Image (cartoon, rainbow, N blue to C red):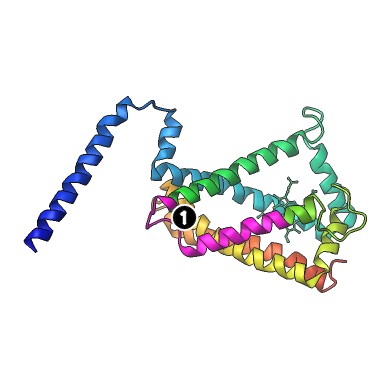
């Protein structure tokens, strides 16, 4: 017992010395910018998760709003998809605004995944439940499939697939296959769960917990997740039932 105690004390002392050593060595290390330094800490990574997550939340909401054009018919949906290519003209060149949005999205996705992986590696016991990990992986895989299906058209069954001008037909062709429609439904259920946890954690990570905000944090997280998931799931169901054809 006494021996054990002595050994533990030595281990403890060793760790303390290592920590102190790291601290005293720090001023000698070349410092990056303030942002890079903040990012190195767990709190900084949580901010990065929260802000990139917020950008992605805004995107899924706007994307849902755009996709509601499916209910207004082929002409409306295709005109909207075509408009995405010319928005910002003539100030920006054709596709300029669309590419700006794409760059923001790509950066947000990279930051979100990198911060998640690094926080996991730092073994933060308080970081993200297992639900967040598997729902995040499903959403990530879904996005890869979704791009191959509706953006690049590689997996899309519409023989007339053309970028931008056949969006309605592409969606209907895709969801006419019950397996694909099922995949979209499952992925959007996972997205709903991810958004619920994510929207809730956003408030925690950003430190938005004053008494004025506290009562409706959960309500906001639930409402956001349900609107996005239910809205997105309604599209494959509408095609499967023939309401959209
Ligand atoms: C059933 C629900 C959905 C439908 C019907 C749908 C439909 C579409 C369509 C038609 C496009 C191609 C737009 C175009 O090129 O004009 C597209 C692109 C895209 N979708 Fe979705 N989408 C759905 C859900 C989602 C979800 C849940 C996400 C993200 C989690 C997502 C992310 C994207 C992304 C990143 C693009 C590429 C945008 C670009 O840069 O061109 N979509 N979607």
**Residue pictured at 57% horizontal, 62% vertical:** 135
Q: Is residue 204 visible?
A: no
> Camera-side residue: 219 or 173?
173
Q: Residue at x 31, y 30 (%)?
A: 26
Quadrant location of residue 215? bottom left
Q: Which residue is mark 1?
A: 201
Between 243 and 216, the one lying in front of the other is: 243
Find out whether residue 227 is within the magenta segment. no
Q: Answer left or right for 214 relative to 105.
A: left
For the N terminus, which image quadrant?
bottom left
Q: Dot 1: few (<14), some (14–19), or many (≥20) neighbours within 10 Å? A: many
Rendered location of residue 96, percent (x, y): 76, 33
- The residue lying at 84 percent from left, 70 percent from top is 243
> Where does the magenta region start and end?
121-145
Secondary element at tag 1:
helix
**Where the C terminus falls, by quadrant?**
bottom right
Is residue 162 something that shows in the picture?
Answer: yes
């Amino acid at each position: 017992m006494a021996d054990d105690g002595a050994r533990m004390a030595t281990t403890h002392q060793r760790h303390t010395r290592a920590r102190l050593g790291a601290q005293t060595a720090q001023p000698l290390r070349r410092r990056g910018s303030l942002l890079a330094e903040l990012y190195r800490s767990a709190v900084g990574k949580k901010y990065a998760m929260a802000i990139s997550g917020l950008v992605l939340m805004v995107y899924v909401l706007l994307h849902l709003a755009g996709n509601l054009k499916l209910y207004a018919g082929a002409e409306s949906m295709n005109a909207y998809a075509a408009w995405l290519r010319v928005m910002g003209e003539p100030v920006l060149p054709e596709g300029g605004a669309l590419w700006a949005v794409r760059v923001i999205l790509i950066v947000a996705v990279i930051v979100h995944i990198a911060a998640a992986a690094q926080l996991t590696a730092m073994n933060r016991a308080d970081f993200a439940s297992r639900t967040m990990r598997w729902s995040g992986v499903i959403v990530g895989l879904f996005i890869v499939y979704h791009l191959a299906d509706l953006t690049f058209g590689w997996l899309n069954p519409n023989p007339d697939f053309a970028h931008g001008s056949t969006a309605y037909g592409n969606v209907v062709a895709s969801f006419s296959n019950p397996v694909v429609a099922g995949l979209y439904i499952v992925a959007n259920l996972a997205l709903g769960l991810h958004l619920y946890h994510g929207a809730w954690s956003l408030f925690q990570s950003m430190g938005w917990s004053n008494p004025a905000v506290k009562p409706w944090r959960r309500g906001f997280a639930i409402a956001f997740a349900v609107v996005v998931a239910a809205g997105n799931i309604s599209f494959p169901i509408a095609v499967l039932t023939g309401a959209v054809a």
